[in-house]
Amino acid sequence: MVVANRRGMGRVGCLFTILIFAVGGYYGVNFGSVYIRYVQMKQAMQAEARLAPSISDEVIRRRLRTRADELGIPRDAQRFTIRRRSRPPEILISTEWDEIIELPFVQRTIHFKPEVRALL
């Protein structure tokens, strides 16, 4: 049996679905890369906080600035606040920065404020 009147709606639906996934992937990659840099910076801060009893604040600050440069994080993030407390004996490391994500038809500013604490 041969169907003579085929409309092709299945193909249009498939192309539309592929288009939706492509646009979602494009936007997701840009947002994802910014979030991954945030996570990597926070992990570097946690590592330095664990080593804090044996190194000075200036060494911690220098290492974190180097890591921020490696990750391509804006200069604003390189102003680290390092506080040591005696009761309870702990260290607090924090910073903050804004990232602007420019995409077609959308510009978004995301504010990051990582903060880590560790016992000394």
Image (cartoon, rainbow, N blue to C red):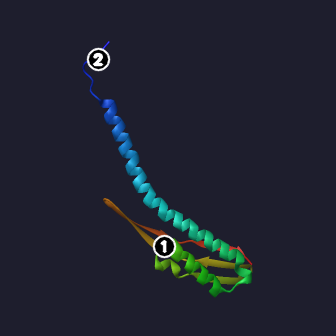
Q: Closer to the camera, 69 or 57?
A: 69
Query: Is 110 located above or below residue 96 in the figure?
Result: above
User: Which residue is pictured at 65% across the width and 72% down the height?
Assistant: 46
- Image coordinates for residue 102, horizontal then vertical, percent: 36, 65
Residue at the image point whose x is 56% and y is 75% from the top: 67
15 over 108 or under it: above or below: above
**How far apart, in angstroms, are the residues tagged by discs 1 and 2?**
59 Å
Q: Secondary structure at mark 2?
A: loop
Q: Quadrant of the C terminus?
A: bottom right
The secondary structure type at the circle numbered 1 is: loop
Q: Residue 32: percent from the left, percent from the top?
A: 48, 59
Q: Residue at x 30, y 30 (%)?
A: 9
Q: Are marks 1 and 2 in contact (CB under 8 Å)?
A: no
Residue at the spot of label 1? 72
Percent across and percent down for residue 99 are 44, 70
Query: Crowding near pointer 2: few (<14 within 10 Å), some, many (20+)?
Result: few
Tell me which residue sits at (68%, 83%) in the image.
84
Residue 39 in picture, x, y percent from top left: 57, 65
Name which residue type carries label 1.
Gly
The quadrant holding residue 5 is top left
The answer to whether 86 appears left or right of 111 in the picture is right
The image quarter in which residue 109 lies:
bottom left
Tell me the amino acid under the disc marked 2.
Val
Disc 2 marks which residue? 3
Quadrant of image for the N terminus: top left
The earlier-in-sequence mark between 1 and 2 is: 2
Q: Quadrant of residue 7?
A: top left
How packed mark 1 is, by other alpha carbons closer than 10 Å (few <14, some 14-19, many 20 or more), is few
Q: As drawn, which residue projects farthest toward the top? A: 1
Residue 64 is marked as none
